[in-house]
Structure formats: structure tokens, C-alpha cells
Image (tube, rainbow, N blue to C red):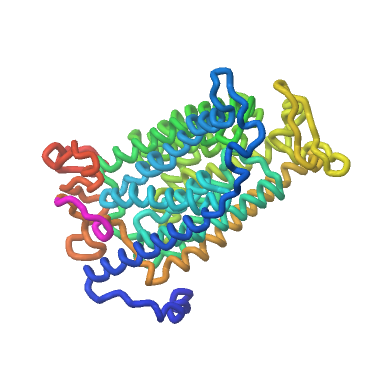
Amino acid sequence: LPVQFCKPAFAFLPQSPGSAAATMEFGNAKFGAVALALQALFVWRCLPHSPSTTSRRTPGCGATQPDGSDRRRWALRTAWDRTTRDVHVMIFAGFGFLMTFLKWYGFCSVGLNMLISALVIQWGMLLLAADFACAAVLISFGAMLGRLSPLQCLVLSLVEIPIFVANEYVGLYIFKAADMGGSMFVHVFGAYFGIAASKALTAPGDGKNSNDHSGYSSDLFAMIGTIFLWLYWPSFNAGLASGDDKHRAVINTYLSLAACTVVAYAASALFEKGKFEMSHIQNATLAGGVAVGTVADMMIRPYGALIIGCLAGLLSVFGYAVIAKKLRAANILDTCGVNNLHGMPGLLAGLLGIIYSASASLDDYGNGLYQIFPARAPVTANGSAFEYVVKDGTLSVEGGGAGRSAGSQAAFQAAALGLTLLCAVLGGLLTGFILRLPILDPNFFQDDRFWHVPSNYDARPFGGEGSVPLNDKEAEEPAILAIFGFLSRKTQPKSESRSPPG
């Protein structure tokens, strides 16, 4: 109904030609025009430049380190080398390769991942989000992987980022909720925004596409993405922390990931009659990083991090083995299973944030309590900064604190989680209806509509002659292998199903 209602509003736009080839060319031309216009807009928006941002006009910029290097440039270089680089590896390589499990959609998985990231970095930077905003949009993209055209990806990014930024602003600066690793504001938001958009986008029969499956080699490349994400997840959770908080965040994340991995393997074997299911291992082994994110910098103790990881691994595998089938039966399509990797573990993280916020005390944290929960700092006269002593000097809470109790802080944590779910679902439904507009050229699990593909590309048309059941064995290798060149049909077995040949 919303789509039919919106059609007259776009009647003035040129309609696509009749033939399939002409329609494809017309759709790509629309994407090119919109992408160039957006890039021109970003350039224009960045034209204003304040002279105060130049180093020569900044007092104290000449101060140097013992080796003679400039202090500010040294600090910037250090921050880039450590955290920003790690997060970029996660965004561009980790998420990109994790999505290559679809057998005939590898070019789009890696390519559109890079396009979305490059767009969101610029759009999010204008709205004070950037890298963490990239993660949220890519998670949402994962829920609809295989069903979005490049033009739809642009629209998804443009619509989601303002909603993401508004929700994060309310949660962090009004509710003053603690969420160091972004489990609530990034993972929960991105997952349920994407699932809601997917539900609004889905038409009857969309879940029966014969190309919506993986192959032996495509799963192998997706596992590369998993390893990248696993290695760099501690940097993601600890990226905004400092001092002892950063140290705790890194250790807690590593412990949670390690425990999660062991339990994910065990649970997969139990659910799959003694064998490992690759989709479980690709995703559930990362759930520990999501589940510990909100409390990564808190005093959860090593055993607490291990328990959280165990719960996350079990919850994620249960989601893939049981809940995912029920969602598909309800015509809620979630291609990458973001509910199982990001959604449910993110909700677990939000609940843990409520519990640990309610139990946080000065006895455990000392004055460092106010660094993690600024709103718990005492109220100061005239709104002046509240200063407190830490090991390496003096820190302050600008404008003083709010004087919250532990219970009050826990209530605000719960409010932030509830608001995030509400914004994600409502925003996702709205975005899904927008993405259904026929001028946005939907796509279905095939690269060849938007990419030049190698000669061995052999995806079956959706519902057309040559369509095969999901469990049938394919004779061709996926197009993603052509990126690397060292794998070819001559070196690959003819059978590429999830079960080994023979």
C-alpha cells in the first residue's frame, strides 16, 4: 500500500526501458548520477574552514616530545596507528569478507560494503558519527544482503545515519548511558533497524530464491572475514576508552571472545548432530565481542568476561539453529543472521549494562567511577566542573555531575536500550517502505546485474529456467574467487555444497 501510494509522487521521473538489458543500464545510470551528486554535496559541505584549526594558530602546538616531534602530530599519529587503523580493518575487510558467503553475490558483498563505508564515513563525519556509524549501517545491510541494489544502498545509508545519530545523542548526552563498545547504540540499533527494513521490503516469495545459499569456497572466504573481526574486536570495544578503562576493555573483550569461540564450537556440534555448521562458526564466535561491549570497561572481573562469552556463544548458535527458522517462516528475512550475531547478544549486553550499573560503587571503582558514569558525579555549585583525582593526575566532569544513584543510572541504561529498540524498529520500517519504491531497482542475490563477471559465473535466474533447490550441488565456483586469481575451475572440485563430496 505505501508503495502504491508513493508512485504518483514519482511520476515525473523517467521510466526505465522495457528490455532487461536496457533496464539494467538505466538503473546503473541512475546510481551514477545520484552518487556523483552526493559526493559533490559532501565536498561543498566541507568547504568552510576555520583558521583556528591550523597548527600555527593553536597555542602550545609547538610543544614537542623528547624526540623532537610535535606533540599534537605525535598524538594524532599514535591514535591513527592503533585504534583507527584497527577499526578500519574491521569495517572494510572484516565485514566485507564475512558477507561473501553467498555463492553468486561475492562482488556485491565486498564491493557494496566498501561503497557504503566510504559514503557513511563522509555522511557520518558531518553528523559526528563516522566509523561507528559505518558499523551500524553495515549490520543493517547484512540483514538485507542480496536484495539491495547500489542505489538502494545509498538511500539506506542516507536515511539510517540521521536516525542513528539522533538516538546515540539522546542515549549518550541526555540519558548519559554507558555503552563503551557500542553494543546498544551500534549493534542493537543496526540489527533491528535492518530486520525491520527487511520485513517492510519483503514481498511474498522473496524467501524462496535459489541463489540464497553458500558454497564451499564462498564460506571459506567468509571465514577470513571472521578472523579479521575476531582479531581486531578488542580495538573496537576499547577505541573510545583511555587509561585503565582501555586496559580493562581490551582484556575483557579478549577473554569473552575466547570463551565464546569454545562454546560456539561445542554448541554447533550439539545442535548439528556432532558436526560443525560453518555459519555458526563464522558468526557465533564473534558474539562474545558484542555481548561484552557495553560493560567492557567496567569492573566485571575476568571470570565475568568468560561467563559473558559462554552465554553469548550459546545464545548465538541457538539463534542460528532455532530462531532463524522461525523468523523465515514468518517471512522475516535476515540474510546474514544479524539477529543472532548483533541483535540478541546486543540485548544481552544492554541487560548486563543495567545489572553492572546498579552494582557499581566507589568501593570498587574509586573516583574512576565518574569516568565511566559521569552522571553519578556530585552536583557542583553554579554548574562548574567537578574535579577528581586519579592515579596520573586530575580529571573533571564538565558542568558537574547529576548526582545519580546506582539505581537511577541503571534505570537510564534501561531507558537507553528501550529507546534504541524503538528508534531502530520504527526507522527501519520507514526505510523499508522507501526502499520498495520501484525507481530504486531491487536486486536478488546475483552479481551480474551490476558487475562485469568472469565467464564461469553461472547463477540461476530467480524463478526462471534452470533454478535449482537450495541443497543441490553446483558445478561452478563463485565469482568472488576471480578477485584473487589463484583459484580456478581447474583446481576446484565440481561439488561445492556444505557437505563434503562422497
Residue 3: give x, y in percent of width and height. 44, 74
Q: Residue at (63%, 25%) from the top-left corner?
A: 301
The majority secondary structure of the magenta stretch comes to: loop
Whether residue 294 is visible to the viewer of this picture, yes or no, is: yes
Residue 172: give x, y in percent of width and height. 66, 46
Residue 184: give x, y in percent of width and height. 59, 45
Q: Is residue 46 above or below residue 316?
A: below
Whether residue 306 is visible to the viewer of this picture, yes or no, is: no
Closer to the camera, 346 or 16?
16
Q: Residue 405 sits in which quadrant?
A: top right
Left or right relative to 481: residue 175:
right
Q: Residue 413 sits in which quadrant?
A: top right
Query: In the rendered structure, does residue 359 fall within the stretch colored magenta?
Result: no
In the image, which residues are magenta?
Answer: 448-455
Residue lying farthest top?
66
Q: Residue at (72%, 21%) from the top-left corner?
A: 391
Left or right relative to 142: residue 294:
right
Q: Residue at (45%, 55%) from the top-left corner?
A: 327
Closer to the camera, 147 or 387?
387
Q: Residue at (17%, 43%) from the top-left corner?
A: 495
